[in-house]
Amino acid sequence: MSSTVFHLAEAPPQLLPARELMAFSLGSHILLVPFGVALPFLTLLMHYRGLRREDPVALKLARRWSAVMAVQFAIGVVTGTVLSFELGLLWPGMLGRWGDVFGLGFGVEAWAFFLEAVLIAVYLYGWRRLKPWTHFWLGAPLPLAALMGAFGIIAANAWMNTPRGFSLDSEGNPVDVEVRRAIFTPMFGPEYWHFAVAMFMTAGYVVAGVYAVGWLRGRRDRYHRLGFTLPFTVAAILTPVQFVIGDSTARAVFHRQPVKFAATELVWETDTHVPEYLYGRLNTDGTISGGIRIPQLDSILAGFRPSTRVTGLTSVPASDRPTTVQATIAHWAFDTMVTVGSLLVLLALWYGWVWLRHRELPHNRWFFRCAAVAGAACLIAVECGWITTEVGRQPWIVYNEMRVSEAVTTTRAGSLWAMFGLIAVVYVLVFGAFLAVVLTMRTRWRTADENPDAVRGAPAPEDDTPYGPRDEPGAAVGGPPSAGGSGDSGRDAGGAS
């Protein structure tokens, strides 16, 4: 009997809709996470540049990015709250049994969330109302609050991958919980740094991509150059760093979760001199269809030598490992993530080479075309990373301790499918509203930059100084730096081209 058939026979009927609903909600929410984690840092970095150099263009960008940051945070509240409810409603078996062990991570994330909400409110309120440097320093803790939220979530997920910090009583329930060991598990460090750097990379490439599109459409002013250069430089610096971190994270999975590693690399039998397959599909008899086979590379990547012994899927019973379909999904997701990362390294090297030689941006249109799609590629890589993490761990929700089928709710499958449909509709409306708000802001900013006189009488004109009275005539660039459109600050705006 194949492992796929075995799993289907054992799974309760509500397992599939519960997993699909959780996957849809998490996959939607994670598209917003890079901006919640990293956009505050990019905004404050631009804000600092504006204050330090008395640069009105930098201040204009910082203020507009802060508005997008606030809208994104509001949408993240909706999707994050849905996930919190789903965790308890769909997987009561896990929380009921293990909540006392790993629940602190979710508590940390909740505190970080409320702290970030307060800091964003203060930061937005501070424009035109606080002294420039006071305003900046009140916003400075924002990136730390965002990273603290990521700390809590990754601590919980890392524990699910390498559970420890507890003992089991005679009935199999966890006792004698050691909080420090439950938080700082073997996979916490690799997961956290891999995730955090990915968030900063993704936000940097997405923001820069907006201005790359503007550059391709002929908007070559300083506004677009600065809006592109700062986030792209941050992302480009982190890209080779992430490549090294990702490699060490994969090696940590090899040591700590050997069956999961076997699934992501399609290793069927435990052996040495194991080849690497780029894509390909695992069959039920252990053969691999399609893909590109590179002899011995998997063993070399895992242990730096061809004689490295790699654990195969058949080292455990079929009921304790991913199905062939799940292994293929994890493998494709992992290969896609690595492919995107490799291409981004080449893009970052291109940028760095031109910058070091000429101290200016590349003028090649193909560079900006690649930069324009780099953000979308990063979002795909983030999705693939979570698919690898979650699907590769199957059938365990707590690795080697509790199966997903043991944790799932007893709610009828029909009700879960109905809930799935309802949430899908809500998410379409929420993300549609988010897009509509951002596009409206873009249009307003562009109108203000292209024709300031047309909006002079409108409320809150965007060409006024961010510090000082809005209606101050002829605001000067000196003194408190302004966000005004003087010099070559540019015609177009936005955050969107």
Image: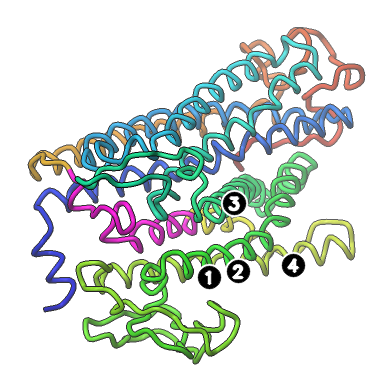
Foreground mark, 1 or 4, reads 1
Which mark, residue 193? Answer: 3
Secondary-structure class at tag 2: helix
Q: Amino acid at mark 1?
A: Thr
Residue 161 sits inside the magenta stretch: no
Q: Amino acid at mark 3?
A: Trp
Q: CA distance from mark 1 to mark 4?
A: 17 Å
Sequence-earlier tag: 4 or 2: 2
**Residue drawn 34% across the image and 60% down it:** 393
Q: To which residue does mark 2 refer?
A: 343
Foreground mark, 1 or 3, reads 3
Secondary-structure class at tag 1: helix
Would you say the residues marked 2 and 1 are in contact, meaning their CB atoms lie under 8 Å apart?
yes
Q: CA distance from mark 2 to mark 1?
A: 6 Å
Q: Please indicate, yes or no, whether residue 446 appears anywhere in the rendered image.
A: no
Name the spot of residue 234 as percent of width and height, x first: 72, 49
Q: CA distance from mark 4 to mark 3?
A: 25 Å
Q: Point out the stretch of residues depicted in magenta.
A: 380-408
Secondary-structure class at tag 4: helix
Secondary-structure class at tag 3: helix
Q: Quadrant of residue 266?
A: bottom left
Q: To which residue does mark 4 refer?
A: 350
Would you say the residues marked 1 and 4 are in contact, meaning their CB atoms lie under 8 Å apart?
no
Looking at the picture, tell me which residue is in the foreground, 494 or 274: 274
Looking at the picture, tell me which residue is in the foreground, 439 or 335: 335
Sequence-earlier tag: 3 or 2: 3
Q: Amino acid at mark 4?
A: Trp
**In the current view of this chain or complex, which residue is farthest to the right?**
478
Q: Quadrant of residue 410?
A: top left
Q: To which residue does mark 1 refer?
A: 339
Sequence-earlier tag: 1 or 3: 3
Asked if residue 131 lies left or right of residue 120, the reply is right
